[in-house]
Amino acid sequence: MSFSEQEVERYARHLVLREIGGSGQQRLKAARVLIVGVGGLGSPAALYLAAAGVGTLGLLDPDTVALSNLQRQVMYDMADVGRGKALSAGLRLSGLNPEIEIDPLPMALDAANAAELVAGYDVVLDGTDDFATRFAVNAACVAKGKPLVSGAIGRWSGQVGVFGAGLTRGKPLAERQPCYQCLVNETPPDAEACSLVGVVGALAGVVGSMMALEAIKLIAGAGEPLNGRLWVYDALDGESRTVRLSADPACRVCAAA
Amino acid sequence: MKLWVNGEERAVQAVSDVAGLVAALGLDSRKVAVERNFEIVPRSTYGRTPVAEGDRIEIVHFIGGG
Protein backbone atom coordinates (compact mmCIF):
# COMPACT_ATOMS: atom_id res chain seq x y z
CA MET A 1 0.00 0.00 0.00
CA SER A 2 1.58 3.29 -1.01
CA PHE A 3 0.69 6.89 -0.27
CA SER A 4 -0.20 9.62 -2.73
CA GLU A 5 1.60 12.98 -2.54
CA GLN A 6 -1.52 14.36 -0.85
CA GLU A 7 -1.47 11.64 1.77
CA VAL A 8 2.21 12.18 2.49
CA GLU A 9 1.44 15.83 3.18
CA ARG A 10 -1.74 15.10 5.16
CA TYR A 11 -0.05 12.59 7.45
CA ALA A 12 3.34 14.37 7.65
CA ARG A 13 3.22 14.75 11.47
CA HIS A 14 2.55 11.02 11.88
CA LEU A 15 5.16 10.00 9.34
CA VAL A 16 7.94 11.73 11.28
CA LEU A 17 6.97 10.05 14.54
CA ARG A 18 9.30 7.13 15.25
CA GLU A 19 6.44 5.07 16.75
CA ILE A 20 4.15 5.52 13.73
CA GLY A 21 6.18 6.38 10.63
CA GLY A 22 5.42 4.92 7.22
CA SER A 23 4.68 1.42 8.45
CA GLY A 24 2.35 2.58 11.22
CA GLN A 25 0.54 4.91 8.85
CA GLN A 26 0.07 2.01 6.43
CA ARG A 27 -1.41 -0.06 9.24
CA LEU A 28 -3.79 2.79 10.01
CA LYS A 29 -4.80 2.96 6.35
CA ALA A 30 -5.45 -0.78 6.25
CA ALA A 31 -7.40 -0.75 9.53
CA ARG A 32 -11.15 -1.07 9.97
CA VAL A 33 -12.52 0.47 13.18
CA LEU A 34 -16.10 0.28 14.43
CA ILE A 35 -17.31 3.16 16.61
CA VAL A 36 -20.39 2.17 18.58
CA GLY A 37 -22.21 5.34 19.60
CA VAL A 38 -21.35 8.58 17.83
CA GLY A 39 -22.26 10.86 20.72
CA GLY A 40 -20.15 12.60 23.33
CA LEU A 41 -17.31 10.06 23.18
CA GLY A 42 -17.77 8.80 19.63
CA SER A 43 -17.64 12.34 18.20
CA PRO A 44 -14.06 13.25 19.16
CA ALA A 45 -12.94 9.63 18.72
CA ALA A 46 -14.29 9.47 15.16
CA LEU A 47 -12.95 12.91 14.25
CA TYR A 48 -9.43 12.03 15.39
CA LEU A 49 -9.46 8.56 13.81
CA ALA A 50 -10.70 9.99 10.49
CA ALA A 51 -8.05 12.70 10.64
CA ALA A 52 -5.45 10.06 11.49
CA GLY A 53 -6.21 8.17 8.30
CA VAL A 54 -7.88 5.02 9.63
CA GLY A 55 -8.87 3.42 6.32
CA THR A 56 -12.43 2.38 7.19
CA LEU A 57 -14.62 3.77 9.96
CA GLY A 58 -17.95 2.19 10.89
CA LEU A 59 -20.22 4.76 12.56
CA LEU A 60 -23.02 3.05 14.45
CA ASP A 61 -25.77 5.13 16.07
CA PRO A 62 -29.56 4.89 15.77
CA ASP A 63 -30.23 8.40 17.11
CA THR A 64 -30.88 11.81 15.60
CA VAL A 65 -29.05 14.95 16.68
CA ALA A 66 -30.77 16.97 19.42
CA LEU A 67 -29.97 20.53 20.43
CA SER A 68 -28.90 19.29 23.89
CA ASN A 69 -26.25 17.12 22.18
CA LEU A 70 -24.33 20.15 20.89
CA GLN A 71 -23.05 20.96 24.41
CA ARG A 72 -20.49 18.11 23.96
CA GLN A 73 -20.99 16.21 20.68
CA VAL A 74 -18.50 18.23 18.65
CA MET A 75 -19.19 16.24 15.46
CA TYR A 76 -22.43 18.13 14.84
CA ASP A 77 -23.64 21.66 14.24
CA MET A 78 -26.99 23.43 14.10
CA ALA A 79 -27.73 22.22 10.59
CA ASP A 80 -27.57 18.61 11.84
CA VAL A 81 -30.27 18.97 14.52
CA GLY A 82 -33.04 16.49 13.68
CA ARG A 83 -30.85 14.52 11.28
CA GLY A 84 -29.49 11.02 11.84
CA LYS A 85 -26.15 10.92 13.61
CA ALA A 86 -24.56 8.13 11.55
CA LEU A 87 -25.25 9.87 8.23
CA SER A 88 -24.41 13.38 9.49
CA ALA A 89 -21.17 12.13 11.00
CA GLY A 90 -20.33 10.31 7.76
CA LEU A 91 -20.69 13.52 5.75
CA ARG A 92 -18.61 15.51 8.22
CA LEU A 93 -15.80 12.93 8.24
CA SER A 94 -15.76 12.56 4.45
CA GLY A 95 -15.29 16.33 4.28
CA LEU A 96 -12.47 16.12 6.80
CA ASN A 97 -10.69 13.25 5.07
CA PRO A 98 -11.89 12.07 1.64
CA GLU A 99 -9.13 9.43 1.58
CA ILE A 100 -11.01 7.14 3.97
CA GLU A 101 -14.07 4.90 3.68
CA ILE A 102 -17.06 5.46 5.95
CA ASP A 103 -19.72 2.87 6.80
CA PRO A 104 -22.70 4.80 8.22
CA LEU A 105 -24.71 2.35 10.36
CA PRO A 106 -27.93 4.10 11.46
CA MET A 107 -29.09 1.26 13.67
CA ALA A 108 -29.03 -0.01 17.23
CA LEU A 109 -26.60 -2.69 18.32
CA ASP A 110 -28.00 -5.46 20.49
CA ALA A 111 -27.14 -8.97 21.59
CA ALA A 112 -28.72 -10.40 18.40
CA ASN A 113 -26.71 -8.42 15.81
CA ALA A 114 -23.54 -7.46 17.71
CA ALA A 115 -21.33 -10.36 16.68
CA GLU A 116 -22.11 -9.95 13.00
CA LEU A 117 -21.46 -6.19 13.16
CA VAL A 118 -18.20 -6.52 15.07
CA ALA A 119 -16.88 -9.32 12.86
CA GLY A 120 -16.15 -6.96 9.97
CA TYR A 121 -13.75 -4.74 11.93
CA ASP A 122 -10.29 -4.96 13.50
CA VAL A 123 -10.83 -2.74 16.55
CA VAL A 124 -14.06 -1.70 18.29
CA LEU A 125 -14.64 1.51 20.26
CA ASP A 126 -17.56 1.65 22.66
CA GLY A 127 -18.81 5.02 23.84
CA THR A 128 -22.48 4.19 24.28
CA ASP A 129 -24.65 5.39 27.12
CA ASP A 130 -26.21 2.22 28.48
CA PHE A 131 -24.89 -0.91 30.08
CA ALA A 132 -26.98 -3.37 28.05
CA THR A 133 -25.32 -2.16 24.85
CA ARG A 134 -21.90 -2.19 26.52
CA PHE A 135 -22.39 -5.83 27.53
CA ALA A 136 -23.51 -6.77 24.00
CA VAL A 137 -20.49 -5.06 22.42
CA ASN A 138 -18.16 -6.75 24.90
CA ALA A 139 -19.59 -10.24 24.40
CA ALA A 140 -19.31 -9.82 20.63
CA CYS A 141 -15.68 -8.67 20.90
CA VAL A 142 -14.83 -11.70 23.05
CA ALA A 143 -16.63 -14.05 20.65
CA LYS A 144 -15.04 -12.57 17.52
CA GLY A 145 -11.58 -11.98 18.97
CA LYS A 146 -11.53 -8.19 18.66
CA PRO A 147 -9.85 -5.71 21.00
CA LEU A 148 -12.35 -3.38 22.69
CA VAL A 149 -11.51 0.21 23.57
CA SER A 150 -14.12 1.20 26.12
CA GLY A 151 -14.75 4.69 27.44
CA ALA A 152 -17.29 6.05 29.87
CA ILE A 153 -18.17 9.41 31.37
CA GLY A 154 -20.52 10.73 34.03
CA ARG A 155 -20.64 14.11 35.77
CA TRP A 156 -16.92 14.96 36.16
CA SER A 157 -15.48 11.42 35.95
CA GLY A 158 -14.07 9.48 33.04
CA GLN A 159 -12.72 5.97 32.51
CA VAL A 160 -10.92 4.32 29.59
CA GLY A 161 -9.81 0.72 29.30
CA VAL A 162 -8.67 -1.67 26.57
CA PHE A 163 -10.19 -5.13 26.94
CA GLY A 164 -8.29 -7.81 25.04
CA ALA A 165 -10.07 -10.92 26.29
CA GLY A 166 -11.04 -11.82 22.73
CA LEU A 167 -7.34 -12.05 21.85
CA THR A 168 -6.39 -14.38 24.71
CA ARG A 169 -9.25 -16.89 24.64
CA GLY A 170 -8.33 -20.40 25.66
CA LYS A 171 -5.08 -19.38 27.37
CA PRO A 172 -4.35 -20.17 31.04
CA LEU A 173 -5.98 -17.69 33.46
CA ALA A 174 -2.69 -15.95 34.28
CA GLU A 175 -2.18 -15.10 30.59
CA ARG A 176 -5.73 -14.03 29.88
CA GLN A 177 -6.70 -10.40 29.49
CA PRO A 178 -9.92 -9.26 31.17
CA CYS A 179 -13.11 -8.41 29.33
CA TYR A 180 -15.40 -5.49 30.18
CA GLN A 181 -17.70 -7.75 32.15
CA CYS A 182 -14.83 -8.91 34.38
CA LEU A 183 -14.91 -5.28 35.59
CA VAL A 184 -18.63 -4.50 35.46
CA ASN A 185 -20.39 -7.77 36.30
CA GLU A 186 -23.97 -6.58 35.96
CA THR A 187 -25.92 -3.41 35.27
CA PRO A 188 -25.48 -1.25 38.36
CA PRO A 189 -28.83 -0.49 40.02
CA ASP A 190 -29.89 3.13 39.63
CA ALA A 191 -27.28 3.59 36.89
CA GLU A 192 -26.91 7.31 36.39
CA ALA A 193 -27.84 8.61 32.95
CA CYS A 194 -25.99 11.72 31.79
CA SER A 195 -29.37 13.24 30.92
CA LEU A 196 -30.31 13.14 34.61
CA VAL A 197 -27.08 13.88 36.45
CA GLY A 198 -25.22 15.87 33.79
CA VAL A 199 -21.78 15.67 32.30
CA VAL A 200 -19.29 18.43 31.60
CA GLY A 201 -18.89 18.70 27.84
CA ALA A 202 -15.12 19.04 27.66
CA LEU A 203 -14.76 15.76 29.60
CA ALA A 204 -16.25 13.96 26.58
CA GLY A 205 -13.44 15.48 24.53
CA VAL A 206 -10.77 14.23 26.94
CA VAL A 207 -12.12 10.68 27.19
CA GLY A 208 -13.15 10.30 23.53
CA SER A 209 -9.73 11.55 22.40
CA MET A 210 -8.06 9.10 24.78
CA MET A 211 -10.08 6.30 23.16
CA ALA A 212 -8.88 7.39 19.69
CA LEU A 213 -5.32 7.53 20.97
CA GLU A 214 -5.51 3.99 22.38
CA ALA A 215 -6.94 2.73 19.07
CA ILE A 216 -4.07 4.38 17.18
CA LYS A 217 -1.54 2.76 19.55
CA LEU A 218 -3.17 -0.66 19.08
CA ILE A 219 -3.22 -0.37 15.29
CA ALA A 220 0.21 1.18 14.81
CA GLY A 221 1.81 -1.06 17.44
CA ALA A 222 3.03 1.99 19.37
CA GLY A 223 3.89 2.00 23.07
CA GLU A 224 1.83 0.23 25.69
CA PRO A 225 -1.91 0.30 25.04
CA LEU A 226 -4.14 0.19 28.13
CA ASN A 227 -4.73 -3.56 27.80
CA GLY A 228 -5.70 -4.97 31.18
CA ARG A 229 -5.64 -1.53 32.75
CA LEU A 230 -8.22 1.11 33.53
CA TRP A 231 -7.45 4.82 33.38
CA VAL A 232 -9.58 6.69 35.88
CA TYR A 233 -9.88 10.47 35.62
CA ASP A 234 -11.38 12.78 38.22
CA ALA A 235 -11.78 16.06 36.40
CA LEU A 236 -12.87 18.05 39.46
CA ASP A 237 -9.70 17.12 41.35
CA GLY A 238 -7.59 17.26 38.18
CA GLU A 239 -6.17 13.85 39.02
CA SER A 240 -5.95 10.56 37.19
CA ARG A 241 -4.49 7.16 37.87
CA THR A 242 -4.17 3.85 36.07
CA VAL A 243 -5.11 0.64 37.83
CA ARG A 244 -4.51 -2.96 36.82
CA LEU A 245 -7.38 -5.28 35.96
CA SER A 246 -7.34 -9.04 35.82
CA ALA A 247 -9.59 -11.60 34.21
CA ASP A 248 -12.32 -12.80 36.56
CA PRO A 249 -12.05 -16.61 36.71
CA ALA A 250 -15.85 -16.74 37.11
CA CYS A 251 -16.71 -14.17 34.41
CA ARG A 252 -19.93 -15.19 32.68
CA VAL A 253 -18.65 -13.88 29.32
CA CYS A 254 -14.98 -14.73 28.96
CA ALA A 255 -14.19 -17.40 31.55
CA ALA A 256 -15.48 -20.24 29.39
CA ALA A 257 -14.76 -18.58 26.03
CA MET B 1 -7.23 -2.08 61.45
CA LYS B 2 -5.76 0.89 59.61
CA LEU B 3 -6.19 1.11 55.84
CA TRP B 4 -5.76 3.84 53.27
CA VAL B 5 -9.22 4.31 51.76
CA ASN B 6 -9.52 6.68 48.81
CA GLY B 7 -6.22 8.28 49.75
CA GLU B 8 -7.01 8.84 53.44
CA GLU B 9 -5.86 6.78 56.39
CA ARG B 10 -8.87 5.27 58.07
CA ALA B 11 -9.54 2.96 61.00
CA VAL B 12 -11.78 0.15 59.80
CA GLN B 13 -13.27 -2.77 61.71
CA ALA B 14 -10.81 -5.65 61.39
CA VAL B 15 -11.45 -7.77 58.31
CA SER B 16 -9.50 -10.61 56.73
CA ASP B 17 -10.56 -10.41 53.12
CA VAL B 18 -12.10 -8.10 50.52
CA ALA B 19 -15.57 -9.61 51.03
CA GLY B 20 -15.35 -8.57 54.69
CA LEU B 21 -14.13 -5.12 53.72
CA VAL B 22 -17.02 -4.60 51.29
CA ALA B 23 -19.44 -5.48 54.09
CA ALA B 24 -17.62 -3.31 56.66
CA LEU B 25 -17.65 -0.29 54.35
CA GLY B 26 -21.27 -0.91 53.33
CA LEU B 27 -20.45 -1.01 49.61
CA ASP B 28 -22.82 -2.22 46.91
CA SER B 29 -20.61 -4.43 44.76
CA ARG B 30 -22.98 -4.00 41.82
CA LYS B 31 -22.09 -0.30 41.72
CA VAL B 32 -18.39 -0.20 42.54
CA ALA B 33 -15.16 -2.06 42.02
CA VAL B 34 -12.66 -2.42 44.84
CA GLU B 35 -9.07 -1.64 44.07
CA ARG B 36 -6.45 -3.04 46.43
CA ASN B 37 -2.87 -1.84 46.07
CA PHE B 38 -3.47 -0.47 42.55
CA GLU B 39 -5.19 -3.61 41.26
CA ILE B 40 -8.93 -4.08 40.86
CA VAL B 41 -10.06 -7.27 42.59
CA PRO B 42 -12.37 -9.47 40.46
CA ARG B 43 -15.67 -9.77 42.29
CA SER B 44 -15.73 -13.57 42.39
CA THR B 45 -12.40 -13.55 44.28
CA TYR B 46 -13.41 -11.16 47.11
CA GLY B 47 -13.69 -14.05 49.57
CA ARG B 48 -10.16 -15.28 48.93
CA THR B 49 -8.34 -11.97 48.49
CA PRO B 50 -6.74 -11.00 51.81
CA VAL B 51 -6.74 -7.49 53.23
CA ALA B 52 -3.79 -6.51 55.40
CA GLU B 53 -2.94 -3.60 57.66
CA GLY B 54 -1.80 -0.61 55.63
CA ASP B 55 -3.31 -1.76 52.30
CA ARG B 56 -4.29 0.96 49.87
CA ILE B 57 -7.95 0.62 48.97
CA GLU B 58 -9.73 2.69 46.35
CA ILE B 59 -13.40 2.49 45.48
CA VAL B 60 -14.02 2.85 41.72
CA HIS B 61 -17.59 3.78 40.85
CA PHE B 62 -18.91 2.31 37.62
CA ILE B 63 -19.99 4.93 35.10
CA GLY B 64 -21.69 4.22 31.81
CA GLY B 65 -22.37 7.52 30.10
CA GLY B 66 -21.16 8.29 26.65
Image: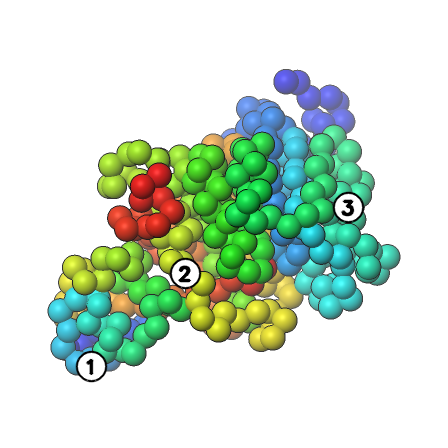
- The three-letter code of the residue at mark 2 reads Glu
Whether callout 2 and callout 3 share a subunit is answered yes
Q: Farthest top residue?
A: A1
Tell me where residue A25 appears, x and y as whole percent. 60, 29
**Alpha carbon separation for disc pair 3 and 1:** 55 Å
Circle 1: element type:
strand
Q: Where is mark 2, residue-wise?
A: A186
Tell me where residue A34 appears, x and y as whole percent. 60, 40
Circle 3: element type:
helix
Q: Are marks 2 and 3 in contact (CB under 8 Å)?
A: no
Circle 2: element type:
loop
Q: Chain of mark 1?
A: B
**In the figure, is residue A230 to the left or right of A10?**
left
Q: Where is mark 1, residue-wise?
A: B11
* Residue at 17 percent of width and 66 percent of height: B17
Q: Chain of mark 3?
A: A
- The three-letter code of the residue at mark 1 reads Ala
**Alpha carbon separation for disc pair 2 and 3:** 32 Å
